[in-house]
Image: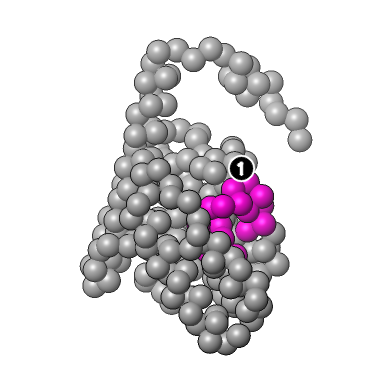
Amino acid sequence: MKRPLFALALMAAPMTAASVAHADACDDRVRGLQQSWDHVNFEVARGVRTAEMARLNTQADAVVAQCGNRAEPLVWDAIITASEAGLRGGIGALGLVRDARSELEHAERINPRALNGAVYVSLGSLYAQVPGAPIGFGNRQRAREYLQRGLATAPNDVDANFFMGDLLSREHDWDGAARYLQRAIDAPARNGRTVADRGRKAEARALLVRVQQHH
């Protein structure tokens, strides 16, 4: 599909000082969401985590509204929304995961490679973990396709490898799951993501133990 001419014109327009400052402010807000999610998801006690994630979700909605048509705030809003859904569980969470999917699809249309392929990895994890029809939209084939795109974008990313390992464990492909989980454990550190790296690698180690027991 061809882009509208006005969109091309906007892309070609020079960045003004005001627009650069706005972009920098949005980047700062996105980093704030990322750091807050890392803390809430991996460090906050389970008993208060749902309430804290819901509060963060409200903040993420505001950042999306402030930053306009950018992929990065949408991705983080979707991740936070999906995390809140996971904490709440049950049928009532399906509305939240549908909202998360819509935001990720919007982000994909804007910039599918934003945040080092996080759009693909997040969509893949949703399709892997949400129940299938008629209850939800879960689909393991679509999950695999999205996760493969995420791995093609960032082959050494801890999240991409963890969620592929998780998907393969759900399919009882124990050898494949073990390979990807070990890659997640061995993944290089991400700048400014110490808390998330530590938490995700702990999850990968725990899942790898269960995979090896089945194997």
The reply, left or right, for residue 186 in relation to residue 28 is right
The part of the chain drawn in magenta is 147-164
Q: Is residue 48 visible?
A: yes
Q: Residues within 10 Å of mark 1 (few under 14, many from 20)?
A: many
- Which residue type does callout 1 highlight? Pro
**Residue 169 placed where, x, y %?**
59, 76
Name the foreground residue: 132 vs 28: 28
Q: Which quadrant of the rendered structure holds the N terminus? A: top right
Q: Is residue 138 above or below residue 157?
A: below
**Residue 96 placed where, x, y %?**
45, 62
Examine the structure image and report whether residue 149 is included in the region drawn in magenta.
Answer: yes
Look at mark 1 in the image and give the residue it sits on: 112
Please name the predominant secondary structure of the magenta segment in the image. Answer: helix
Q: Residue at (50%, 59%) from the top-left corner?
A: 186
**Residue 154 placed where, x, y %?**
59, 48
Q: Is residue 122 visible?
A: no
Q: Which quadrant of the rendered structure holds the C terminus? A: bottom right
The reply, left or right, for residue 88 in relation to residue 158 is left
Name the foreground residue: 48 vs 200: 200
**Residue 160 placed where, x, y %?**
56, 57
Residue 32 appears in which quarter of the rendering? top left
Name the foreground residue: 2 vs 197: 197
Q: Residue at (38%, 27%) from the top-left corner?
A: 24
Disc 1 is placed on an element classified as loop
The colour style of the image is one colour
